[in-house]
Image: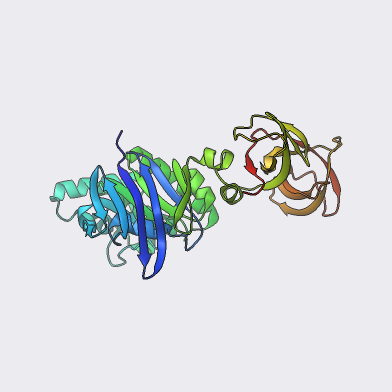
Amino acid sequence: MEPLLELQQISQAYGPQLVVKDLSLSLKKGEIGCLLGASGCGKTTVLRTIAGFEPLLQGEIRLNGTVVSRAGFSLPPAKRQIGMVFQDYALFPHLSIFDNVAFGLRKLDKTELIRRVNQALELVGLQTELNKYPHEISGGQQQRVALARALAPEPQLLLMDEPFSNLDVTLRERLSMEVRDILKEFGTTALFVTHNQNEAFAVADRIGVMHSGEILQWDSAHNLYHQPVSPRIAEFVGEGALINGVVKNAGQLETGLGLLEGIIKRPLEVGSPVQLLVRPEDVVHDDASPVKAVVVRRSFRGASILYALRLANGDLVQALVPSHCDHQPGEKIGIQPDVRHLVLFPADA
């Protein structure tokens, strides 16, 4: 299947500052993609080049196989059939919810316009609010109106810029799942940007971790977590630590957690010093274990406590432990390794 959206080695700069560097990605029809990274990494600029708000310095952007941007050429935004949901919703305060959603449909005949608006509002669960104004509804409902307005013209691609950042944590988590369900029901191809990993994992089929204008890995959430391609990705995605190890043979690794066994996918010579990615779920609390670690820090999370632990060789690991096992910094606790994915990097990586 040909990608609906394809970015081929695009670059963009503001003056002498290169903010997007040789970046490539593709999305199939119906897929939801996400650009994940810290502020200033270039993710919003990528979105703006796709929408047609920014020109390209080099590279090419294709929609449904048609070039919409390349150096020296940019199809106007209005001709791209792209919907956009902004961080601040950008609703018209003087228009009703119905008229906000209808705003991009003014060229349609009245019957079709009413059908599209009602369909979009029903999809986001706001069909009973159509006569209200933006200030009369909650932030979460305003976000749904913005989504309905973007979906009503039936765009071939939907772009969302930090769509949940103005909402409180509980509402953000719930609405992100609801938005995914809505996009999947509508069959919409979408790309959004966020700095929030939980949102990226909850909503996206494919995620691009961005740093300094580049995508370091474009992959599923599962692969980013369990098969990161670099130490930077390993430390950025999820929680965990890199500890020292030495390859003993094709399937064994000597570490501060003891001798670990598993599949070593990366070709490494016996005796090679390596770094091993250890996630909190890889370290099990076990008072009877001969392997001991010192509690360095603790973070209470209600049902569980995240402990930072120092091993006998000085390496630090994390462990997620049920909160009825209550230990203080300085205490020694027994731990048992349960490392099922031997994610290794050369020691000098």
User: What residue is rendered at 31% in x and 53% in y?
Assistant: 59
**Viewer-proximal residue among 158 and 222:** 222
- How far from the left and from the top, in percent, is residue 211? 49, 56
Above-or-below relation of 135 to 83: below
Q: Which quarter of the picture shows residue 338? A: top right
Residue at 74% x, 43% y: name it: 321
Q: Residue at x 35, y 61 (%)?
A: 12
Q: Quadrant of residue 185?
A: top left
Q: Is residue 114 visible?
A: yes
Q: Nearer the viewer, residue 155 or 144?
A: 155
Q: Residue furthest bottom?
A: 15
Number of numbered tags placed on the structure image: 0
Q: Could you tell whether 204 is left or right of 244 in the image?
A: left
Q: Residue furthest left?
A: 109
In the picture, measured across the screen, residue 333 lies left or right of residue 274, that is right
Is residue 87 at least partly visible in the picture? Answer: no
Please state, as top left, top right, bottom left or bottom right, where the N terminus lies in the image: top left
- Residue 113 placement, left or right of 253: left
Residue 208 pos. (x, y %): 46, 48
Q: Position of residue 243 (x, y in %)?
A: 71, 46
Residue ID at (23%, 60%): 72
- 212, above or below 348, in the image: below
Q: Is residue 24 above or below residue 248?
A: below
On the image, the x and y values in percent for residue 173 come to 51, 49
Colour mapping used in the image: rainbow
